[in-house]
Image (cartoon, rainbow, N blue to C red):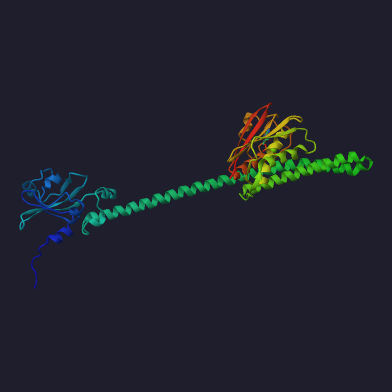
Amino acid sequence: MPCDRVALSPHLLANIFPFHIAFNRNTEIVQIGKVLEQKYPKISVGSQIAEHFQVTRPNIPMEFDAIAKRQKSLFLIQYQHNSMQLKGQMVYDERSECMLFLGSPWVTDLVQLKHLSIDLNDFAIHDPIVDYLFLLQAQNTALADTKQLAEKLTIQRAEISKALEKEKELNELKSRFITTTSHEFRTPLTKILGMTEILEHYSHKWSEDKKRVYFFGIKNNIKYLTQMLDEILLLDLAEAEALELNPSFIDIGEICQDLVKELQTVKGNQHKLKFSNQSIRLQGLLDEKLLRQVLKNLLLNAIKYSSPGSIVNLKLIGHQQEAVFQIEDQGMGILPEDIEFIFEPFHRGKNVENIPGTGLGLTIVKKILCLFGGNSTVKSEVGVGTTFTVSIPLG
Ligand SMILES: Nc1ncnc2c1ncn2[C@@H]1O[C@H](COP(=O)(O)OP(=O)(O)OP(=O)(O)O)[C@@H](O)[C@H]1O
Ligand SMILES: [Mg+2]
C-alpha cells in the first residue's frame, strides 16, 4: 500500500538525533536522544530543561513561548554542569504540542570531546560536525606526523654533526700522532744508529766493558721503542673499543708488591720505591695485565718526573667493594694550567723540558679505568710532588 506520510517514531528520532531534547509547554523534558540519555543520566525525562540548560543564543530565557517565536534562529544552549554547548534548531511539533531541540555538541577541537565524555561515534552520520571533526582529526594526524618527522630530522642532523665532529677530532689526533711519534721514534733510532756506527768503526780497539756500555745503550733504546709501540697498539685497541677484559681472581697486594720489586730492580733506577698495604689480603676479579699497565704507567711517571734518590710511594687502601691506590712522588709536580689536560692524548706538561715521553701513558690509564668502571684524581704542587689516586670497583 503506497504511503503518503512518514511519521517519525521516537526510536528513529532518538537515533537520528542522538542529542535531541523534547520538552512540553511547561518546559518539562519528555524525551531525550540516546547519547544524551546514556552519557548524561542527570538530564532525565520529567525534569525541567532549565535545570540543565540555559539559552546562550539567541538572548532569550528558557521559556516555551519565547523559544517558539524564535524558531528560525540558530540556538546555542549551555549545559550547566560542564562546558558542553549544544548547537541546533528548535522545532515545534503540532501533533505532540512539544518543542524539539535538534542539535549536537558544538566542539572546535578533538580534545574537547574527551572532556565531554563523548566520541566521534556518538554523532549521527548526517551531522555536519562529523565532517568537521574528521577534518580536524586528519589535520591533527598530519601535524603529529610532521612533528615526528621534524624531531627525527633534528636527531639525525645532531647525529651527523656529532659524527663529523668525531671524524674531525680523529683526523686531528691522527696528524698529531704522526708528528709526535715520528719525532719520538727518530730520537732513539738516531741514537741506535750512532752507537752501532761507533761500534762498527772503533770496537776492535775497545775493552769488553766499554763495548758492553754501548750494547746496553742500544738495547735500552730498542726497549723504549718497543714499549712505545706497545702503548700505541693498546691505545689503538682502546680507541676502536676492541680492548677486552680478561678478569681473573687476583691478590691485589701481591701484584703491587711484585710490580714495585720489578721497577726497583730496573737497571739505572736510583729511586726508593716503597709499597704499603693497608688492606688485609685484598682480592678481586680484575684483569691483571691491564691493572699492571695502569699502576706501571703511574709509577713510571712518578719515577720519570722526580729526582734520583727521592721516594716513590705506592699505597694500597682496600675497601670491601673497592681497591684504592695512591702513587705519590716528591718530584717536579704538574703546572696548574696542565692539570686538566694531562689525560688527553699527546699532552705533555710545559715543565717536562727534555724528559722523553709521548704523552700517551695517562691516556691509556684513563681508557683502562673507564673499562674497569673506575676513576682517578690527581693532586700536585710544583716543586713538591704529585699524588695520583685511583679507585677501582671490585666486582
Ligand atoms: N708524576 C708526575 N709528576 C709530574 N708530571 C707528571 C706526572 N705524571 C704525569 N705528568 C705530566 O703529565 C703529562 C702526561 O703524562 P703521560 O704519562 O700521559 O705522558 P708522558 O709521561 O709524557 O709520556 P709517556 O707516553 O711516555 O708516558 C706528562 O708529560 C707530565 O707533564
Ligand atoms: Mg708517562
Q: Residue furthest bottom?
A: 1
Can residue 194 be spotted in the picture?
A: no
Please tell me in which quarter of the rendered image ligand 1 is found. top right
**Is residue 206 rendered to the left or right of residue 155?**
right
Q: Residue furthest right?
A: 205
Judge by depth and name the residue closer to the eye, 187 or 364.
364
Looking at the image, which residue is at 72% across and 30% down?
A: 311
Compared with residue 103, is residue 345 higher up or lower down, i.e. above or below? above
Looking at the image, which residue is at 11% across and 62% down?
A: 9
**Residue 223 point in image, percent of width and height:** 77, 44
**Is residue 356 rendered to the left or right of residue 199?**
left
**Residue 108 point in image, percent of width and height:** 26, 48
Judge by depth and name the residue closer to the eye, 253 or 16.
253
Could you tell me which quadrant the N terminus lies in? Answer: bottom left
Badge count: 0
Q: Residue furthest top?
A: 383
Q: Quadrant of residue 276?
A: top right
Looking at the image, which residue is at 80% across and 36% down?
A: 268
Could you tell me which quadrant the C terminus lies in? Answer: top right
**Is residue 100 rendered to the left or right of residue 151?**
left
Q: Residue furthest front?
A: 280
Compared with residue 125, is residue 395 higher up or lower down, i.e. above or below? above
Can residue 147 be spotted in the picture?
A: yes
**Residue 359 point in image, percent of width and height:** 68, 39
**Residue 93 point in image, percent of width and height:** 7, 56
Compared with residue 42, is residue 376 higher up or lower down, i.e. above or below? above
Q: Quadrant of residue 351?
A: top right
